[in-house]
Structures are given as C-alpha cells and as structure tokens.
Image (cartoon, rainbow, N blue to C red):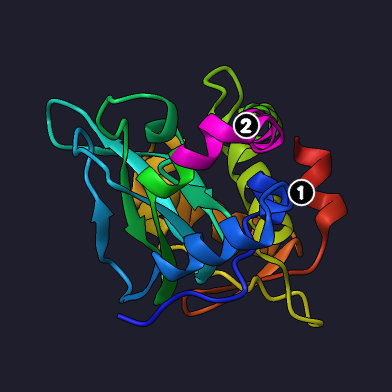
C-alpha cells in the first residue's frame, strides 16, 4: 500500500498541534487503502491497531442485534476518522464500519498517535475537542433517531442531514447515494415504507427520484415537516 500524504483530519484540526517532524513520522508510518463499496473495514468487538481517516468516499457505523438486524448509528464522510475511541481505551470496536461507496482511507498507526498524545498536551486537547465534536454531531442528528418523532419527520431530517453532510450538485442532487435498506435501518422501519414515503415526498414536490439518486427540490418543504 502507498503512504498517505496531505493528511486532513477535521476532528483533530489537521494535526496542527504536531510538529513538522512528528507529522512527517506519522505520515511515514501510515498507509493509503482503497476499499470498494460494501467492504467491512472493521467489525464490532474487533481490536484496532489503526485509526482510519476517510480521504475520499463515505462509510457507516452500525451495530447488530441478537437477531442479526443491522442498526446504523452514524454516517461518515471525507475528513472523518474512525477508531478514535481506541486511542484512549484498550476496548475493542464498539461498532462495525462499512464503506458506503468506493472509498480511500488513510490508515494511521495508533501507537504513533498515542506517543504524541503522551508528549504533546496541545495535541491531547485536540483529541478531546474531537470527542466533543462527536457529541455535537450526535445532538444535531438526534431527531433522526428520536423514537417519539414520526418516521416521516425522521426521514425528512435524514435527507436534509445527508445533503448537509455530503453536499449537493447545483441541480440539488445529493452527492451520496444511500440504499433504501440503509435508510430503513437508520429509521427502524421497513424498506417498503421508506420507498412509499419517498414517493410521497416526490408527489409533494419536495424531491425527485431517479433510480437510486435523490434530487432535493424543496428544503423548506422537508423542514416544515420536522
């Protein structure tokens, strides 16, 4: 695998607290990894010796219940990192991570990062800020997972979140394609019900649907539902 270059990790503020020497050493020990769509990057309860930065693409965090049903807990995109929890804990992964689209990851050596955490207080503060960012993300997406909201409201929030998180083309098309099955997993409902609601949104003029693509026509209409 090739070495990573131009590491940009939003949650750690681009490693700006690291010296040039430390950053070069981290880059030297890193690896660039291409992962095809659907690839499981790590599984729930798996020990991690790497921290993964998404250079290109998108991934999801999910857990599985006793019946083997998947429950998606978070979507991640360019600049997000996976495995931060393992930097301060010897516990195994709390979730599974899977590539939603063809993605490129920067695999950072966990031990090398931990060395910097022990010797660089500013870098340690950056990591604490990253955990705060995660909490803020959870708060901003709470409506999506809020059980007392209707599924219609939560689907509207999910679409708006995907537009904000991954961006849109000038015509309003979401840059990320999310399977209806994954939407259903997030909302705790059936794929068929999600399809019916998307058709309802389409008939209301909120969006257009072309195969697996969603073109957002009226953010205001979806916001009014919420």
- Residue 36 found in image quarter: bottom left
**Residue 135 or residue 128, whichever sits in front:** 128
Question: Residue 164: x, y in percent?
Answer: 74, 56
Residue, far top: 148
Compared across the picture, whether 173 is left or right of 60 comes to right
Residue 160 percent coordinates (x, y): 71, 52
Q: Which mark is residue 124?
A: 2
Tell me: 85 left or right of 164.
left
Residue 59 in the image: above or below residue 146: below
Residue 190 is drawn in which quadrant?
top left
Q: Which residues are magenta?
A: 115-131
- Count of marks placed on residues: 2
The residue lying at 51 percent from left, 51 percent from top is 81
The residue to which callout 1 is attached is 222
Q: Quadrant of residue 226?
A: top right
Q: Is residue 153 above or below residue 109?
A: above
């Amino acid at each position: 695998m090739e070495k990573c270059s131009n590491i940009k990790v939003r949650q750690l503020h681009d490693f700006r607290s690291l010296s040039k020497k430390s950053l070069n050493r981290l880059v030297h020990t890193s690896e660039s990894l291409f992962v095809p769509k659907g690839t499981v990057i790590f599984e729930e309860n798996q020990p991690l010796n790497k921290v993964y930065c998404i250079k290109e693409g998108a991934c999801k965090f999910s857990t599985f219940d006793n019946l083997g049903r998947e429950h998606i807990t978070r979507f991640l995109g360019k600049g997000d990192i996976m495995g931060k929890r393992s930097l301060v804990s010897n516990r195994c992964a709390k979730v599974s991570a899977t590539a939603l689209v063809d993605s490129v990851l920067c695999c950072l050596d966990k031990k090398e990062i931990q060395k910097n955490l022990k010797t660089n207080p500013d870098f340690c503060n950056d990591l604490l800020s990253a955990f705060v960012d995660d909490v803020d993300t959870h708060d901003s997406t709470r409506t999506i997972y809020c059980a007392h909201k209707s599924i219609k409201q939560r689907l509207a929030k999910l679409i708006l979140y995907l537009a904000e998180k991954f961006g849109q083309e000038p015509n309003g098309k979401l840059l990320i394609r999310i399977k209806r099955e994954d939407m259903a997993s997030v909302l705790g409902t059936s794929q068929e019900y999600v399809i019916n609601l998307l058709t309802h949104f389409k008939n209301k003029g909120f969006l257009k649907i072309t195969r697996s693509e969603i073109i957002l026509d009226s953010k205001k209409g979806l916001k009014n539902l919420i």
